[in-house]
Image (cartoon, rainbow, N blue to C red):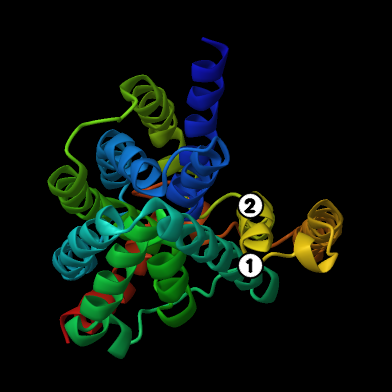
Amino acid sequence: MTTLLLVHLAGFAAQLVDGSLGMGYGVTSASLLLSTGIAPALASASVNAAQLGTTLSSGISHWKVGNVDWRIVRRLSGPGAGGGFAGATVLSSLDTSVARPVMAWLLLVLGVVVTVRFVLRPSPRRGRMSRWSGRRRFLGPLGAGGGFVNATGGGGWGPVVTSTLLATATVEPRRVIGSVATSEFVVTVAASAGFLVGLGLRDLDWWTIGALMLGGVVAAPFAALLAGRLPQAVLGVAVGGLIVLLNLGPVLTGLGAQEVGVSVPVVVGGVAAVWLGLLVRAGVVVVRARRSRPDEVPDEDLRPEGSASRAEREPDDERVAAGVNA
């Protein structure tokens, strides 16, 4: 019972971060499950099964608060579903001895990507979506790649797709986060179908899946309200560093670090110290940024829907739509 409660709390925390930051649920949950010794394919299948509920709840929550651009959702969902099904099929066919280091490496890389992304750019840009980043020729391959990584790594849709769009598309962060989170439901359905074909229902721990799902479903409405509003630099560095620490040990062990005299705990401890330093730095950056503009008019993203500022923003939304339709 204690274990299930911890899994439930982990699911709640992971979804709270994922829904507000646009990434984190899958890679965090998969890393935690792998650390318990579960097989990689089963870990990814369990996370995707739990996300059937969390992504649906998250998508509905984002839609209700006006965070979803359906043009982006349509152009990401189809290719993402194809990539997710392919990734699940590939991971299901790999031997555990091969899949475990592959998945650990992939999660480690994703953790580094997330950390670096928020260290180098603490606050996402705002403005209009660039025309090229809204086209099918861009969103299609991005969705397919994100779906494949999401299935093979047990997570990665957010780190791949959300990070890319926040870096290249200057549409409001909350709309990027909401649209990517909504399209993830379709990707999750396809990946789950792939695992069902490759693994069936055997060996899945439905109590663990249920605890993860329940935690995420409860957190989803709160996360949607917080999308783009929490200090993203701190959250991004915190989540990225946690993912790195959870997967660094298995990667070093797989490389035979101990056989050449390298102490895995010492290396992990050193990386943890660096991570804490980056986390403190991110917090300082956020505090300084807020102190430097105490008398500014509140950010448009923080104003309630339907306010006068939103009416003034409608022409920009039309230009965003034109860019996505190009």
Q: In this view, does 3 lie to the left or right of 75?
A: right
Tell me if mark 2 has few (under 14), some (14-19) or many (20+) residues whose alpha carbon lies within 10 angstroms of its own.
many
Report x, y in % for residue 272: 80, 54
* Helix, strand or loop status at disc 1: helix
Tell me if mark 1 has few (under 14), some (14-19) or many (20+) residues whose alpha carbon lies within 10 angstroms of its own.
many
* As drawn, 196 above or below 271: above
Q: Is residue 168 left or right of residue 247?
A: left
Which residue, as the protein is rendered here, is positioned at the far front?
A: 259
Alpha carbon of mark 2 to alpha carbon of mark 1: how far?
Answer: 9 Å
The kind of residue tagged 2 is Leu
Q: Name the residue under label 2.
A: 235
Q: Are marks 2 and 1 in contact (CB under 8 Å)?
A: yes
Which residue, as the protein is rendered here, is positioned at the far top?
A: 1
Q: Name the residue under label 1.
A: 118
**Does residue 172 show up?**
no
Sequence order check: which comes first, mark 2 or mark 1? Answer: 1
- Residue 296 vs residue 8, the one in the foreground: 8
Report x, y in % for residue 10: 54, 31
Give the residue displayed 40% in from the left and 74% down from the top. 165
Q: In this view, does 250 lie to the left or right of 69?
A: right
State which quadrant residue 174 falls in. bottom left
The kind of residue tagged 1 is Phe
Report x, y in % for residue 235: 63, 52
Give the residue displayed 27% in from the left and 37% down from the top. 49
**Does residue 223 show up?**
yes
Q: How many numbered marks have been drawn onto this rendered protein structure? A: 2
